[in-house]
Image (cartoon, helix red, strand yellow):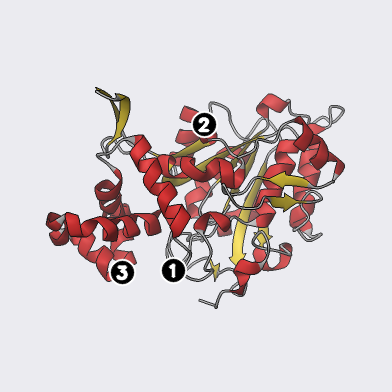
Amino acid sequence: MVRFLGLITCLALLGTSALLAAAPGDPPIKVSAPLASWRDTAAKKAITDFVVRVTDEKSPDFVPPAERIAVFDNDGTLWPENPMPFQLAFALDELKRRLPNEPTWKDDPAVQAAMKGDLPALLADHYKGLFRIIELTGSGMTTVEFAVRVRNWLATAKHPRFHRPYDRLAYQPMLELLAYLRANGFKAFIVSGGGADFMRVFSEHVYGIPPEQVVGSNARTVYELRENGPVLVKTLQHLFVDDGPGKPVGIHQFIGRRPIACFGNSDGDLQMLEYTTIDNPRPSLGMIIHHTDAEREYAYDEKPKSSGKLVKALADAPRRGWIFVDMKSDWSEVFADGSASSGQKP
């Protein structure tokens, strides 16, 4: 994806039209005035007030650019996670594609659950079934081979409700937020429970976040020198799950700076919100995307259809000072051109 260099920064600061690069071959996604798809509500004001406070050199809350770290969950924060996380949709499609050539897989309980569409069974016992499917479909190959499979899937698969490619379902207001933060000297990272190798395939062309700024679940990768050159082979050994309490750990290991802004949507982001905002020596902002719009996207918190349960963080938010983004009330648009919201209600 095209990086936000000096020209893009100047355009965003002036409030004139900037461009977010889209998927290769697609028309670019336009970002007009900063936060144009955010209605003038308390959520938008909280963002702009915070940015002004930490970027004004005369402000007592000024934060040097090097310390302006913003972290974003991915599923449910930057794009939807229903009717299932997009990586799970990829893994299930890969499973169906490869199953005829892998007859021994059919007796695996996780495979049987997957073929029945039994999502609760796959997510039970700390996602044991899901990790088994990911192991079968995403390990034992090189990182390049895996990336090619993800790109091929993104080029052909479409969301069952919105009927558009998955990588064209980023939330327009969040794209604008990323552009606004970058224009004001922030460095944005994805910190997500999704697989790092999966997200790094599309993070730059969808969000403008380069792969080195993606922190996700990961496992041991093995180096091999083959006849055609060096390769890295994916395994599922020493699995690190970048979710819940794993997120602050991942931030420490892979970023090395404490964030001053955090954006999530579920209890899986609770510890990342805490780490960002509690006793932070710098000013901080915690924000929760609340899915309240069944018409244009989905409405859920306590009882999601897949991932994204929001109970503890919802209860803790008032005393922690975390800001809720009500998708229905605070966003004038959900997706880039509005067309995706024409899908049938779930």
Judging by the rendered image, the residue that carries numbered circle 1 is 305
Mark 3 or mark 2: whose residue is earlier in sequence: 3
Q: Is 173 left, or right, of 247 in this rendering?
A: right
Picture coordinates of residue 144, whole percent (x, y): 37, 36
Q: Residues within 10 Å of mark 1 (few under 14, many from 20)?
A: some
- Label 3: element kind: loop
* Residues at marks 3 and 2, CA–CA distance in whole angstroms: 34 Å
67 relative position to 40: left or right? left
Q: Amino acid at mark 2?
A: Glu
Which residue corresponds to mark 3? 117
**Which residue position is annotated with label 2?**
212
Report the residue at 29% width, 25% height from top: 228
Establish if 237 lies above or below 107: above
Query: In the rendered view of the protein, which quadrant contains the N terminus?
Result: top right
Q: Is residue 70 visible?
A: yes
Marks 2, 1: nearer the viewer: 2
Q: Distance from label 3 to label 1 (Cα)?
A: 13 Å
Q: Nearer the viewer, residue 229 or 91?
A: 229
- Circle 1: element type: loop
